[in-house]
Amino acid sequence: MPAPALIAVDSEQTSASRVNIFVHGYRSMASPAEVEAARLRVQRTGVTGASYLFRWMAGSWGDSATFTGLRAAAKAGRIRYALSPMSLLIDAGVIGLHEVAQFKRMERRAEQVGRELPSLIAEIAEGRPVNLIGHSLGARVVHQTLRGAHAADLTISDVVLLAGAADLDAADWEQCVRGIHGTLYNLYSPRDRILRMTPDLRRRIGCRPLPDVVVDGVSKVVNHASADVSHVAHWTQLAELLPKVWTACQATPETEATPAVEP
């Protein structure tokens, strides 16, 4: 399994005065084509600074296809049983359990790579301020990175969470927010069907607003409701969404219209 790595979005901008780290979520950037699509997407946001994609092995749709294919092959010689209602019901349950186990495994991996990310960022940041942008399970990575930022001597400026699969009820969110120098932007949707189907009862930050944290009279949290944007579209439409909510971006002429994002 490839080690987590930071990939420069534009090699000509690596010496810019600040660093932006984009962290993908579940089953994203699993192929070179998806990495290239993400790189172009980040470029189109118009964000200033030295931008990097953090690629970590978050599973792929091929994992499910392989599992389903193996079950089909095992049943190929038992046609009558394979097409029975009971067989179809059992198949649905087995595949569902496989998906649950896969997601929970990726949750644990997100936490692990999140603990490793601060040292990787420190190597390239070299004292420059850092912005963190995380989608889906990438927000879980970012949460762990915030926990370890001080130990790695990182200066975290802004944080943007998009349909985050991090736990809203984590006890240290206030401490994490107080540790950043800028603002935490949380894009959430109460109607996010993907997060609402995650296999536990924990509340996710991508479904609800994060409580505000006020430091020296300044609000450090900005919540944006993005009810009309699907879970996956928070990543695939990054170039259109991010300039609407984060002042570090400047929309490019090619930016297409997207559903409104409300404060």
Image: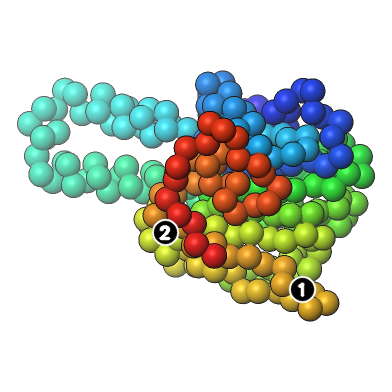
Q: Residues within 10 Å of mark 1 (few under 14, many from 20)?
A: few
Q: Residue furthest front?
A: 253
The residue where tag 1 is placed is 218
Question: Closer to the N terminus: mark 2 or mark 1?
Answer: 1
In this picture, residue 258 sits left or right of residue 93 = right
Q: Does residue 7 appear in this view?
A: no
Q: Residue, x 60% and y 54% (percent of image)?
A: 245
Q: Residue, x 45% and y 60% (percent of image)?
A: 189
Q: Position of residue 4 (x, y in %)?
A: 69, 34
| Secondary structure of the residue carrying numbered label 1 | strand
Q: Residue furthest bottom?
A: 217
Number of numbered discs on residues: 2
Q: Position of residue 144 (x, y in %)?
A: 70, 55
Q: Is residue 51 above or below residue 258?
A: above
Q: Position of residue 235 (x, y in %)?
A: 52, 42
Q: Amino acid at mark 1?
A: Val
In this picture, residue 203 sits left or right of residue 221 = left
Q: Does residue 242 appear in this view?
A: yes
Q: Viewer-proximal residue, 10 or 77? A: 10
Disc 2 from disc 1: Cα separation: 27 Å
Q: Which quadrant: the C terminus?
A: bottom right
Q: Amino acid at mark 2?
A: Ala
Q: Which quadrant: the N terminus?
A: top right
Q: Viewer-proximal residue, 4 or 1? A: 4
The residue where tag 2 is placed is 227
Q: Residues within 10 Å of mark 2 (few under 14, many from 20)?
A: some
Q: Is residue 206 above or below residue 25?
A: below
Q: Is residue 108 above or below residue 64?
A: below
| Secondary structure of the residue carrying numbered label 2 | loop
In this picture, residue 90 sits left or right of residue 5 = left
